[in-house]
Each structure stands twice: as structure tokens, then as C-alpha cells.
Amino acid sequence: MRCELNYSAHTVLSYRTDLEQWRDFATGGNTGDFNPLDVTTGDLRQWILNRASAGDGARTLRRKATALRSFYKYLMRNGHIDRNPASDLILAKPDKPLPNFIRPHETESLFDETFDRENFLETRDRLILLMLYTTGMRRAELLTLTDVNVDTARCELKVLGKRNKERIIPFGSELKEMIELYRTLRMQETTKTPEFFFVRPGGFPLYPMLVERVVKTGLTGKAHAAKLSPHVMRHSCATDLLNNGADITAVQQLLGHTSLRTTQVYTHLTYRELQNNYQLAHPRAQKKGGNHGS
């Protein structure tokens, strides 16, 4: 997965954890006795039921089943077994909830709010929020964004996305101004230009939970989404672009989606928003009774 399929470190770790959990269950904790060939489909089903009883959700269970299928498919390909015992694992497809997003008036209010433009941390944290929202990048892409790949002359960012795919993201004058202000203040925090664009005082790189905390703190009391996270800023970026007439294939390229189907979920959001606005605004939408026709 890591070397041939070029999957992300997060995905590789998830599959590793799933297989280690299966090994521990199959051996009762005596991991030295693990024999992956001595297993039936019933054994695998028993483990899935065990994980469901432990509280794993539908999505997690499907990933665990996929990890098992991939593992035994690998053993088949290398001639260790002649049948995949995990191929008969059938799990119900979980519902796909629509992504959480922040309403435009909330983001507008957020970024119109004043902050201390001479304070490094306040400026950095505001820039994190603005960059997530205006570019739609993922948290991992923000963490690995290098300084040399932030070009204010061309107003472009180069990010490293899933499966190590690079893409170029354009940005506007507001983000350009914030980047230049941040770089000026950053020079006072570190003696040399750091490798990564976003840093802590002293030039140390950020870490995932710090970004989560920055976003949650910045949005608390200002936004009313069910979840306040970096990915919600990404969802908000895509939703607002489509609501304002952006071409869906352009949004797909901006977000780095491999499949257009992934981007199409945001069209459901825009349609739901249209329905809500119609119900609230159209004088005939709230009429009760009567023969309105279709």
C-alpha cells in the first residue's frame, strides 16, 4: 500500500491497525501463534461482530472488512492460499451524510473581524482559517505546505495531496496580503526561512491537533455547523464556490478529487440550500391547503 499504491500514511496506519486487531482476536492475545491461513469466513464474521459490539460504526466495519479482503487477496496472489475467506463478508452500506459547512454570512463575519496584525500567533491562526477556506486544501496538505511552494508573485500554491499527487491552487489578493504579513512576522520568530510555511514560535512545524484546535477556537461562537474542523472549512469552500456558479469540474480540480462523484456531493448541499431558501422566501411556499398544482 505504501510503496506500490502510494496510499497516505494515515490510510496505511489504519489498515495496519485493523490487521493487528484481527491477529490479536484470532490468537486471543498470543500473537506468536497467529496463522493467517488457518481461518474460515465464519471466524472473520465473528471478529466483525465483536468489533460491532465494541462500538465500531458502519464505516469503520466496512474498512476493516476491506482490510481483510486485501490481506487475503495478497496471500492468494503470492500462492499461499487458493481462496479468499474474506470475499464472502457482506456488510450493509452506511448512509452517506451530507458534509457539514459554514454559512456564507458566518464566514464573512469571521474574516471581517479585526485581529492584532502585529501578533505572530493571531496572524498565523487567522491565516490558517483563511487559507483553509479560500483554497479548500486538506489539513494534511496545510501541514506539509512548504515555504518555497507559496508564490505570492503568481498567487499560486503547490500542495502535495493524497497519493503524493501535486496540484496548483490559485488564490486572491486577500490571501496574498495575509501571507505577506505572516511572513514578515515570522522573520521575527525564527532566524532563517523554515522549510514548512506554517510554524510555531522558534520555527518548529505544526502538528495535526494544533491545527484542529486553531480552527475550533476560531469558529466557536461564530459558526453553527455540527462540527468545527479543518475539513468543514474545505466543505464550506466547495459549497460556496458551487453556490456562486463555479463549474463542478473546476471545483474537482481545485479540491484534488480523483472522481467527479466525490465533488457531486456538494451539489446536493447547494440543492438543499436552494430548497430552504425557497421555503423561507417564496410567498406561495408557505401557503397551507389549496390546489397549487405541480
Image (tube, grey):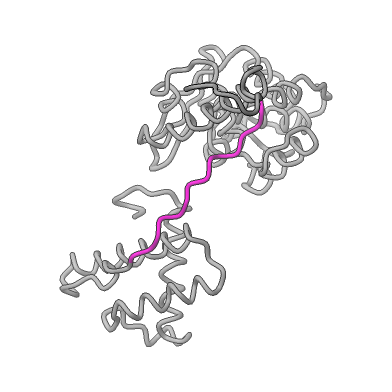
Q: Position of residue 113 (x, y in %)?
A: 80, 22
Q: Residue 177's quadrant in the figure?
A: top right
Q: Position of residue 123 (x, y in %)?
A: 75, 27
Query: Residue extending furthest front?
Result: 290
Q: Tell which of 111 and 261 is nearer to you.
A: 261
Q: Which residue sits at x=78%, y=31%?
A: 122
Indicate left or right for 193 with 113 as reference.
Answer: left
Q: Which residue sits at x=77%, y=19%?
A: 112
Residue 250 against residue 70 in the figure, above or below:
above
Instruction: Provide the residue span drawn in magenta.
Output: 90-103
Q: Tell which of 285 and 293 is nearer to you.
A: 293
Residue 38 against residue 220 in the figure, above or below:
below
Q: How many marks?
A: 0
Q: Which residue sits at x=56%, y=33%?
A: 234
Figure quadrant of the N terminus: bottom left
Q: Tell which of 33 and 257 is nearer to you.
A: 257
Q: Which residue sits at x=54%, y=16%?
A: 244
Q: Position of residue 265 (x, y in %)?
A: 46, 35
